């Protein structure tokens, strides 16, 4: 799921791919910021893997534990420390052309419940979008012309993963899933599709 997003990201800011196999100095092109999706991509080196497979091994990404935080919500990136780090990285690395920003998922999955009315869900999401927009505007203020990508979220399968766990209530995601009213994958992913459509409107 990450790779489709990253292919679009790569094509957007690189106009002349290099297929050289020579030793090259890595040039930062992407700043990776966000919640667990950023945290795991930083740990796995996913963006570098994709760039390398597309023949662009001389391009790389930058991230760290201050700006790629597992469990983070939008308000975490309205705080001084991560904002200072985002600004510092963008100013210190002028070759960065894009910020990959994955936040918002923990906001609505942490506060949404399957018993909510459509109006309650919309009110919750409106608050998330206001904070998300604030973070995006902050990033853009650090470097005029920087491109910000919000990838959204795809296929969260809490129920299948948790109920197949040896001790479901001991699963690290159990409390989040249970607080949502134990929704199945259709309910969760319909919500995520709705979030993406609402964000795009």
Image (cartoon, grey):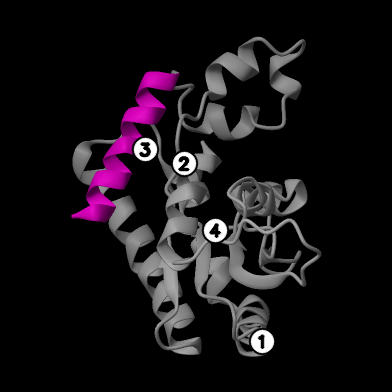
Residue 51, percent from left and from top = 62, 53
Residue where numbered disc 2 is placed: 4
Foreground mark, 1 or 3, reads 1
The residue under label 1 is: 88
* The stretch drawn in magenta includes residue 181: no
Check disc 3 and report the residue beneath it.
Answer: 192
Count of picture labels: 4
Mark pair 2, 4: CA separation: 24 Å
First along the sequence among labels 1 and 4? 4
Q: Which residues are magenta?
A: 185-201
How packed mark 1 is, by other alpha carbons closer than 10 Å (few <14, some 14-19, many 20 or more), is: few
Q: Does the CB distance between marks 2 and 3 fall below 8 Å?
A: no
Q: Secondary structure at mark 2?
A: helix
- Residue at the image position 24 percent from the left and 45 percent from the top: 197
Q: Position of residue 128 (x, y in %)?
A: 38, 59
Which residue occupies 76% across, 23% down? 170
Q: Which residue is mark 4?
A: 73
């Amino acid at each position: 799921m990450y790779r489709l997003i990253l292919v679009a990201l790569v094509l957007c800011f690189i106009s002349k791919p290099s297929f050289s196999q020579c030793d090259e100095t890595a040039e930062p092109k992407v700043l990776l910021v966000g919640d667990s999706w950023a945290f795991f991509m930083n740990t796995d080196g996913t963006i570098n893997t994709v760039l390398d497979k597309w023949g662009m091994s001389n391009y790389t990404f930058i991230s760290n534990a201050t700006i790629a935080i597992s469990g983070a919500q939008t308000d975490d990136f309205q705080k001084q420390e991560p904002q200072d780090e985002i600004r510092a990285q963008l100013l210190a690395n002028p070759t960065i052309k894009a910020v990959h920003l994955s936040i918002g998922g923990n906001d609505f999955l942490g506060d949404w419940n399957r018993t909510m009315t459509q109006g309650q869900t919309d009110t919750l999401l409106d608050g998330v979008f206001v904070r998300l927009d604030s973070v995006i505007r902050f990033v853009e203020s650090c470097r005029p012309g920087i491109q910000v990508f919000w990838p959204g979220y795809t296929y969260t399968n809490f129920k299948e993963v948790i109920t197949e766990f040896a001790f479901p209530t001991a699963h690290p995601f159990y409390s989040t899933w249970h607080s949502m009213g134990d929704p199945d994958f259709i309910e969760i992913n319909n919500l995520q599709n709705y979030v993406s459509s609402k964000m795009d409107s």
